[in-house]
Amino acid sequence: MHLSRRNFTRLAALSSLTAATGGAAVFGMPAPALAANTAYVFGYFKETPNESGDSYALHLAVSTDGLNWRPLNQNNPVATPTAGTLGLRDPFILRKQDGTFVVLATDLRGRIFNENNQYLHVWDSTDLRSFTGYRRIRMHGLNTHTWAPTAFWVASRNQYAIVYSAYNGADVFMVNYTSDFRTVSTNQVYFSPGYPVLDADIVVDGSTFYMYYKNLADGLIYGARSSTGNPNSYSNYTSGLRQGNAMEAPLLIRSNTGSGWRLWGDSFSPVNNDYYAWSTSNIGGNSWTLLNQRDYTPPLNAKHGSIVGVTAAEYDGLVARWGLPSWVRLKSYNFPDRYIRHADNIGRIDAYPFDPHQDQLWRMVPGLADAAGVSFESVNFPGRFLRHSNYAIRLDANDNTATFRADATFTRVAGLADSSWSSFRSYNFPDRHLRHSGYVLRIDPISASSSATDRQDATFRVS
């Protein structure tokens, strides 16, 4: 049984956008003058190991670098299906030829993957601040699923292609063509290489169509390409990639700068929210460099989503409409899969995911002893703060004594291992910094002359 996918969308070059009528380009007219993309939006649904944080609706996060993400709307949904299964997976955001957006998603709620469905959810949006025209479109009449949609413009047809995973005697990719995301052509097989496949992501770069997908026979991610983008016209050109035990939902995106590419992969299991990413300067080659997990921070609990580039004005509009989170997460520098959390009132760093996932959420408030400093208030236990006691870090209720206020106050400084990160110096023991040791938090004397390990243990990313 296969999980559906996180299928990010490509970052289309705005220079290729043309004026459009009903989704079709108007030829012979100049492209509209559109601002360049400088930021990114991530659309996703959510799952956690014990299902307490599951949300089968559209969520959004924003980023200025395409690597580190901040959820919008406090990580609550911005759109929820009102028909079909009343839930979605694998939301895919596409910027259309006229500069507006369309959202496609799998019509599936929960983790029961043997339910067949012939439909996709669809919304329209001018700027991702609101979602209109909700509908479901029927993609085929087969007794099978319709998973993980991706869509892209095919100039030779003057139409969009919608490609998705389905079963047609084997696990294949199907395609339907459309001009308006309301009516679609008859489905046909798009890619059936002789082994089962899942989760296509297709990017058009110049005259070449690049498709990355999962080979279910060996669990690896492969890249294929075509000069036409026509059904069954792709040939593999990369060797297989994988990190961890299993992966799915490959995503190929180009940087907003127009230089360099990233390939993402999502963990196969909902109990493991790991993301992996590679980079390359040559999309046509077969040389991918694995990124360190400290270089990126996915949205909290995000699964199987999509990324689209947005302008500075669109980014500002999204933040104004939905708001940035009122809480932060603190990521370990030298164990970047681990976050500061409380467990049984002890401060520690643990590999995410874990439940309750709220144990890692903190409100950074003005320091209780000095407003120029910071204190960390638990989100799921309001009124309780991280404080040191005999140099060990605990989560305790604020008793409003001078000692508690001082113990719970820290001075935020440049990261001791990396100045772009942060370290936290104790307010009442200013020669000591917050650090982890054996994954447990404490304050110890650490300075720029301390060992590299000590400096790394005391460095965190606030995200």
Image (tube, grey):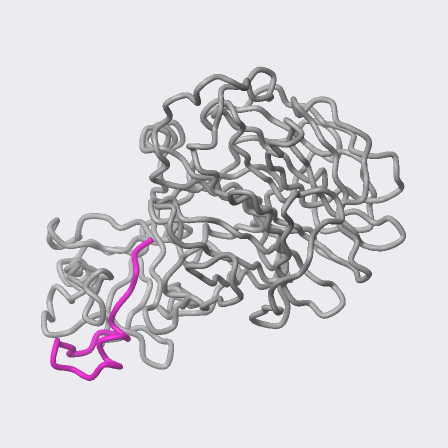
Left or right for 305, reference 337: right
Q: Position of residue 13 (x, y in %)?
A: 44, 38
Pick whichever, 15 or 341, lies toward us.
15
Residue ranking furthest to the bottom: 451
Q: Position of residue 284 (x, y in %)?
A: 52, 58
- Looking at the image, which residue is at 35% across and 46% down? 257
In this picture, is 174 found above or below 235?
A: above
Quarter where residue 149 is shown: top right
Q: Position of residue 137 (x, y in %)?
A: 74, 27
Left or right for 118, reference 21: right
Left or right for 64, reference 353: left
Pick whichever, 198 or 143, lies toward us.
198
- Looking at the image, which residue is at 52% across and 41% down? 43
Pick whichever, 182 or 390, lies toward us.
182
Quarter where residue 373 is shown: bottom left
Quadrant of the rendering where the N terminus is positioned: bottom right
Q: Is residue 336 magenta?
A: no
Left or right for 129, reference 174: left
- Looking at the image, which residue is at 82% across and 50% down? 114
Which residues are drawn in magenta? Answer: 442-463
In this picture, is 396 found above or below 11?
A: below
Q: Is residue 458 magenta?
A: yes
